[in-house]
Image (cartoon, helix red, strand yellow):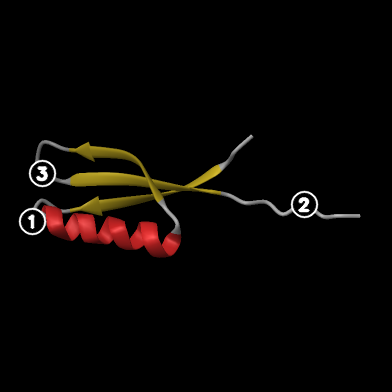
């Protein structure tokens, strides 16, 4: 079974699409995160859920 760890990013209403895109690109390139979910709230606040696989190393005997 694949397990994921999650990170939630919140962007204010004043954040431009270019700023949000750059932040998400940085997380994807350097932290190996992928986009899991995006919510845009009435006030303009944007919340983004990122996820990445948890890699477990199994011992060899």
Question: Which numbered disc flags the more N-terminal residue, 1 or 2?
Answer: 1
Q: Which residue is drawn at the image coordinates 41% and 65% (left, top)?
A: 30
- Describe residue 52's horizontal placement relative to residue 55 as left or right: left
Disc 3 + disc 1, Cβ < 8 Å:
no
Image side of residue 27 versus residue 46, left or right = right
Which SS class for mark 2?
loop
**Label 3 Cα neighbours within 10 Å, binned few <14 / some 14-19 / many ≥20:** few
Q: Can you tell which mark lies on residue 14? A: 1
Vertical placement of residue 31 versus 42, above or below:
below
Residue name at image x 27 percent, y 39 percent = 38
State the residue in front, 24 or 42. 24
Return the residue at label 3: 44
Tell me the CA gap for discs 1 and 2: 46 Å
Residue 21: quadrant of the picture: bottom left
Q: Is residue 38 left or right of residue 32?
A: left
Direction front: furthest residue = 29
Residue found at x 58% / y 41%: 3
Q: Secondary structure at mark 3?
A: loop
What's the mark number on residue 58?
2
Quadrant (top left/top right/bottom left/bottom right) for the N terminus: top right
- The residue drawn where x is 30% and y is 52% is 9
Residue 46: which numbered mark, if any? none
């Amino acid at each position: 079974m694949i397990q994921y760890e999650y990170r939630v990013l919140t962007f204010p209403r004043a954040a431009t699409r270019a700023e949000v895109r750059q932040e998400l690109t940085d997380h994807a390139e350097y932290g190996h995160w992928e986009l899991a979910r995006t919510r845009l709230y009435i006030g303009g606040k944007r919340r983004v859920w990122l996820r990445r696989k948890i890699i477990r190393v199994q011992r060899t005997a």
